[in-house]
Image: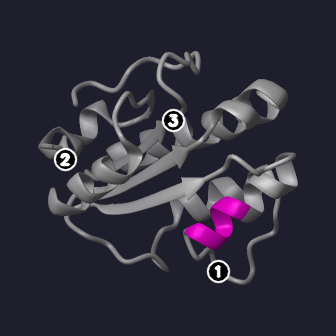
Amino acid sequence: MKAEWLNDEKQAGVFHLRADAREFSEAATAAGLNAYRLDIGHAHDKKDLLVHVSKAMNFPDTFGGNWDAFADCLKDLSWAPAHGAGWVIILDKSKHFCAGHHHEFKDAMDVMAEAAEFWRGQGKALWTLICGPDGWQSGWPDSPAV
């Protein structure tokens, strides 16, 4: 699987991924990006989602566990290893959380979209890719290419 398109920061943002999350994570790493694959299938609320993301991405210990702190961490990735052109966050098994906590999921994706816009201005790509079972529609546009 080829994922060089991920290096185009002008396209980066929040998208639905219709590919195997594990394979895509490997392809993103091979394309020179820092890839995080998060299983959020067991997240039960906003706090739980933020804990999953902060642990998977190794947020600093000072992470405050709220939307503002989430935005701050995504816009200051100085603590994260930087490979090539940016970062890919793959939210695997998203259907349960998105369906049961749609408002909180939308808030999280809004924060991630704002962070992607910030990084585009820095010449880096920050992608958030939402994954779920075949046929499931997350409500976000499909990724540019797979």
* Residue 7: assigned label: 2
The crowding category of the residue bearing disc 1, from other C-alpha atoms within 10 Å (few below 14, some 14 to 19, many at least 20), is few
Callout 3 secondary element: strand
Q: Name which residue lies at 58% across and 68% down.
A: 56
| Amino acid tagged 2 | Asn
47 relative to 14, above or below: below
Q: Report the Cα–Cα distance between label 3 and label 1.
A: 24 Å
Name the quarter where the N terminus is drawn: top left
Name the image quarter holding residue 85.
bottom left
Q: Is residue 47 left or right of residue 85?
A: right
Name the residue located 83 percent from the left edge and 31 percent from the top edge. 101
Q: Which residues are magenta?
A: 52-56
CA gap, disc 2 to disc 1? 26 Å
Q: Is residue 139 above or below residue 120?
A: above
Magenta residues, dominant SS class: helix
User: What amino acid type is highlighted by mark number 1?
Assistant: Pro
Q: What residue does disc 1 label?
A: 60
**x then y, percent, for residue 70:** 69, 57
Q: Which amino acid does the dot numbered 3 rest on? A: Ile
